[in-house]
Image (cartoon, helix red, strand yellow):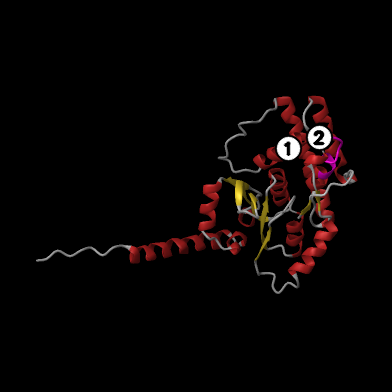
Amino acid sequence: MKIKIMAKGYNAPAEVRELEKQINDFTYRNGLDVKTVFQDLLRYIVHGFSLPDTPPLSDWRYNKEQTKVFYDMFATWIQIMSQQIKRHGWYDAFGDLFMALTSQSGQQQKGQFFTPAHITDLMSKITMGKQESDAKILSVCDPTAGSGRTLLAAKADRPQSYLVAWDIDYTCCLMCVCNFLINGCVGEVVCIDSLRMDNFRGAWIVNEALCRTGLPTVRKLDEKEYNLFKQADIPPYVFFINQKGYDDYFRMRETWAKVMSLFQESPTPQTGM
């Protein structure tokens, strides 16, 4: 959830100021736009967690030395997130950074403010209610996800929740993907106008094998691929079971598909004797 009304400015919390300084220093030294650098950092991180057959970033504009700075920023982010997740259960460093960077002089028109963490925690507890069973899998959707804070709070309350994030802002979607990856969230992020359900710009399936492999991953889909993914109608619980259960589920689906195909085949016409 996000609020589009800009205040005069936003100061990043102390926990993320080292990363804020790295971004600002790199931006100033290279004469770049801070939001461009911030978005490229998000793209760099998402690509790093992508599947091995993912092609390289074709429009990457930085040389080898500059790319090393992105690696350093990535390492700083990992360190911040590890410490803060251990302390608070979930954390959104990029949301705070985005608010701080885009509320700088000359950047206000590009920014937005996100719901404070303690408010999203409260909203989650009110909305999710009492947990009936640890084994029950819930699907939780936020059609204006921002950096994903409301969904992160929901996952903290109900760890086995399949999260669906929609947002029209591409940078917000990248922040959300990064937050899903590092906070151990399973789900999907879709860049789309959730009111008109058009202007599709990409979808990411995040941590689909996390419960089977322990490895955070992300897979980007275009509109056709995402539509096929939704048409497959995979129930959310499948993403939370072990490898044997996963294999059994798809073996069962394959068997049923073969059985159904028998009923759909046209009968062979019989010729007269």
In this rendering, does residue 190 appear at all? no
User: Circle 1: is it few (<14), some (14-19), or many (20+) Cα within 10 Å?
Assistant: many
Q: Is residue 216 left or right of residue 77?
A: left
Magenta stretch contains residue 236: no
Instruction: Compare marks 1 and 2 and give the one earlier in the sequence.
Output: 2
Residue shown at 75%/73% (left/top)? Answer: 130
Q: Amino acid at mark 1?
A: Leu
Residue located at (62% from left, 61% from top): 240
Horizontal and vertical percent for residue 196? 62, 53
When the figure is inspected, residue 154 is found, relative to residue 101, above or below; the finding is below
Secondary element under disc 1, as helix, strand or loop, is helix
Q: Quadrant of residue 12?
A: top right
Q: Residue 26 has which mark?
A: none
Looking at the rendering, which quadrant does residue 138 occupy? bottom right
Nearer to the camera, 1 or 225:
1
- Residue 121 vs 227, above or below: the answer is below
Residue at the disc numbered 2: 23
Q: Which residues are magenta?
A: 99-106
Residue 157 picture quarter: bottom right
Residue wearing tag 1: 41
Q: Nearer the viewer, residue 128 or 47?
A: 128
Q: CA distance from mark 1 to mark 2?
A: 9 Å
Magenta region, main secondary structure: loop
